[in-house]
Image (cartoon, helix red, strand yellow):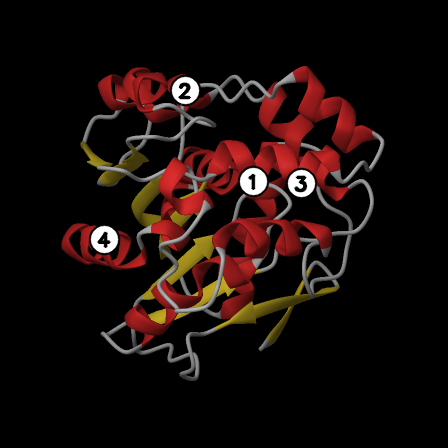
Amino acid sequence: MDLIVAGETVRATTGGRPLNRDLPLLLFIHGAGMDRTIWQLQTRYFANHGWSVLAVDLPGHGGSGGTPPESIAGYADWADDLIAAAGFPSAAVVGHSMGAFIGLHLATHHPERVNRLALLGVAATMPVHPDLLAAADRNDPLAFDLITSWSLAPRSRYGGHQTPGLWMTAESVRLLEHIADGVLANDLHACNRYDEATAAAARVTCPTLLLLGELDLMTRPKAAKPLATALPDGTTVILPGAGHVMMMEQPDAVIDTLAGFL
């Protein structure tokens, strides 16, 4: 479905069921350079288990128009407008990587909008390797290869896709190849600059889940400890054998953990 936010078209998926404003809203926010399709198995499950689901393409990503904000704060303000445009007073928010930073900032600067918060593949800071930043700045496909190699756990690079015949490495690279020039660099710089996560975590007023991959090289579990310590009502779950894109690597485990938390 399409929504209009700040005068621009936003592409979203609802998990195969119409958006129902009599049900609570579950909002999925993707990471840097990605789009709504990263959540396809999770959206289908929750849309059939009591939720109105929205997995959105952030501005300038996937099928959404507009220009990507240059900061996490700008993305969070946009998410606030999105929830209002969808016709809901608040949402349970699930964010991955950059999307986790967006959800965290949203929960502290627009607390009335977030009633549950799940942060996947997150750390207190997310410094981006200079080689990756440089490749993204010049729109070099090397950036896609670097992200994919660091995002997938070793086993996931060679097999283990939930759907027989599909390969997670190629799927991840193809997804990143679809973004417009400059979008990935914009997102990586926004993550690199964001230094408010720990302070923000201390101000979160809703129950919060940290869902981390044991073998995540992008946001190592130990790097999330400051967030876990700061959260007033936080729970941490580490998925054994999972890397950074756990929703693709271990979709059932992610669904089970989110369902238990929500």
Secondary structure beneath dot 3 equals helix
Secondary structure beneath dot 1 equals helix
Gap between marks 4 and 1 measured at Cα: 21 Å
Q: Residue furthest left?
A: 260
- Earlier sequence position, callout 3 versus callout 4: 3
Residue at point 63% right, 55% down? Answer: 175
Q: Quadrant of the N terminus?
A: bottom right
Residue type indicated by callout 1:
Thr
Residue that label 4 marks: 253
The quadrant holding residue 56 is: bottom right
Measured as percent of width and height from the top left, residue 65 is found at 75, 61
Nearer the observer, disc 3 or disc 4?
3
**Mark 4, residues whose alpha carbon is within 10 Å: few (<14), some, or many (≥20)?**
some
Measured as percent of width and height from the top left, residue 222 is found at 30, 17
Numbered circles on residues, count: 4
Nearer the observer, disc 4 or disc 2?
4
Residue at point 80% right, 36% down? Answer: 140
Residue that label 1 marks: 148
Residue that label 2 marks: 124
Residue 144 numbered mark, or none: 3
Q: Are marks 3 and 4 in contact (CB under 8 Å)?
A: no
Gap between marks 4 and 2 measured at Cα: 23 Å
Gap between marks 1 and 3 measured at Cα: 6 Å
